[in-house]
Amino acid sequence: MKYKLFVVFSFLLLIRVSVFSQEHHAKTDTVASHSHETMQGHEGHDHGTDAQHTEAGHHGDTYEKFDPASTAIHHISDANVYSIMDKIRIPLPMILYAKDKGLDMFMSSKFHIGAHEDGHTAYNGYVMQHGSVHRVLDPSFPAQGEVNLGEHPFTLKTEEVNGKKTDVKYLTYQGKEYRLDARSTLDGGILGGGITSFYDFSVTKNVLSMILVSLFLLWAFRKAAKAYEAQPGKAPTGLQGVLEPIFLFIRDEVAIPFIGKDKYMKFLPLLMSIFFFILGLNLFGQIPFLGSTNVTGNLTVTMILAVIVFLVVNFNGKRDYWQHIFWMPNVPVFVKPLLAVVEIMSLFIKPLTLMLRLAGNISAGHIAILSFIGLIFIFGKSGASIGGGAIGTAMAVPLTLFMMAIELIVAFVQAFVFTILTASYIGAAIEEHHHADHAEGSHH
Amino acid sequence: MTGTLAAVGAGLAVIGAGIGIGMVGGKAMEAIARQPEASGDIRSGMILMAAFVEGAALIAILLSIFMAG
């Protein structure tokens, strides 16, 4: 039994690491597969990938090369359309702002989104490529109204931008190639392209999920609260019976021990909101076939949560808290500035790890599940080999089920960990102690 | 090349975190076996410590992703 578990876990570990290592190779693969796609429309456009052209462009028995890494990344990313099982597409409102063009507001159904979440129509100079909106930055491209793009209008090329190899997307329209501009990101170009020609304030898939989960929580807790009024002193029933033990667990195991019996009531609403919001989104993302949104695996979402925690902790920091940061008592004077540097660093590392931990764990779970499902397409050569597909399915189904069971635990554990760490940071900040007994884990 | 190196880095980070979390979990189990009545406190302490170890590993993995990209 022990041995079996060991084998399974080491396999899981291998898969997780290989997902990251494949990322680099994935880039060249996508170039090959996408230039193959363009081949159907017209011949020989990008000369850089001629070798791959002849390799991938052989007619007849070729199949579109399946790339598990980029597929996984695409599925964990946010999107401007909510696709359920690649069939039902819920259009979302687009709110786009470009400096030279002004505000554009329309529904994403204007793009006529088809397979791979690619839009078949350009609208007001914007196009939809792989679920995210791009702008065609060319004066010769019609900036107003709908433009029909035809089949497979998009190509991907690897280009060197600022000494870094990046994927640049192109649109082919009436035999001319147009460079696509991605939305602005405020990360200094680390994850995206930095500031570009337009800003995207749209209600995306993630935003819709957050609204849905918030509304559900509002409904559930109002219902449970009403039940306490309707039958006071009675044993909880139904939804109330589900929420009460979790609520009491967070209060008795997290809030009271870490913050203290007399002060915890002030922070309980925050802790409960954080816990149930994260738990709700984690579980919502686990529902199969329902878009499986990766909201808590999105760095932006977790960053905002971490910033809220950072502000609450530091605005509630008492004198002792700041003294321990800037001028640590009970240590020699020459150590004090050194410790101050370390403590100031840890001030920012704490919310940073909160942000990374949640996003990393949830994204890793989604990537692992997607990789297992990807086994079907790897073995089945994207539908070319039925027998391979059957073997892949036989492997993928138990592995995916196993991973989803693990993810169910992770959903609870990560929500719990975020809450317990928030509580411990708040507890350390508001503690007013005497210097004889300040040992319990507030400094590490 | 940098991609491969980044993958090796991610692997090393995972090994470190694995050892760390293994030690946290193992010691916590020992402690619970010794004092079953304190299992609640030990368990929440264990999860807290495991979260700290994991945080360090995640920083390393994210760094390696950025290096690869």
Image (tube, coloured by chain):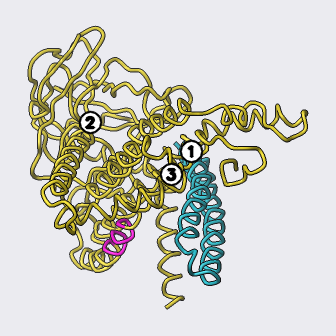
Chain colours: A yellow, B cyan
Rounded to the nearest angstrom, the CA distance separating label 2 from label 1 is 37 Å
Q: Nearer the viewer, residue A200 or A334?
A: A334
Q: Are marks 2 and 3 in contact (CB under 8 Å)?
A: no
Amino acid type, mark 3 = Lys
> Which chain is indicated by disc 2?
A
Kindly report the distance in space between the C-alpha atoms of the residues bearing marks 2 and 3.
48 Å
Does the magenta-highlighted stretch encompass residue B60? no
Residue A132: image tag: 2
Which circle, 2 or 3, is nearer the viewer?
3
Magenta residues span A400-408
- Residue denoted by label 3: A261
In contact (CB < 8 Å): disc 1 and disc 3? no
Q: Are marks 2 and 1 in contact (CB under 8 Å)?
A: no
* Point 21% across, 75% down: residue: A386
Q: Measured from the top left, where is residue A233 in percent x and y? A: 22, 63
Residue farthest bottom in this picture: A1
Which chain is indicated by disc 1?
Answer: A
| Rendering coords of residue A371 (x, y %) | 37, 63
Q: How dense is the environment of label 3, judged by Cα within 10 Å: few (below 14), some, or many (20 and up)? A: few
Q: Main secondary structure of the magenta part?
A: helix
Front-most of residues B12 and A149: B12
Kindly identify which chain the residue marked by label 3 belongs to: A
Name the residue beneath numbered marker 1: A425
Q: Name the quadrant containing residue A331.
A: top right
Residue drawn at x 74%, y 51% is A437
Please tell me which residue is depicted at 30% across the width and 66% down the height of the picture.
A373
Residue A407 is inside the magenta segment: yes
- Ranked by sequence position, the earlier of labels 2 and 3 is 2
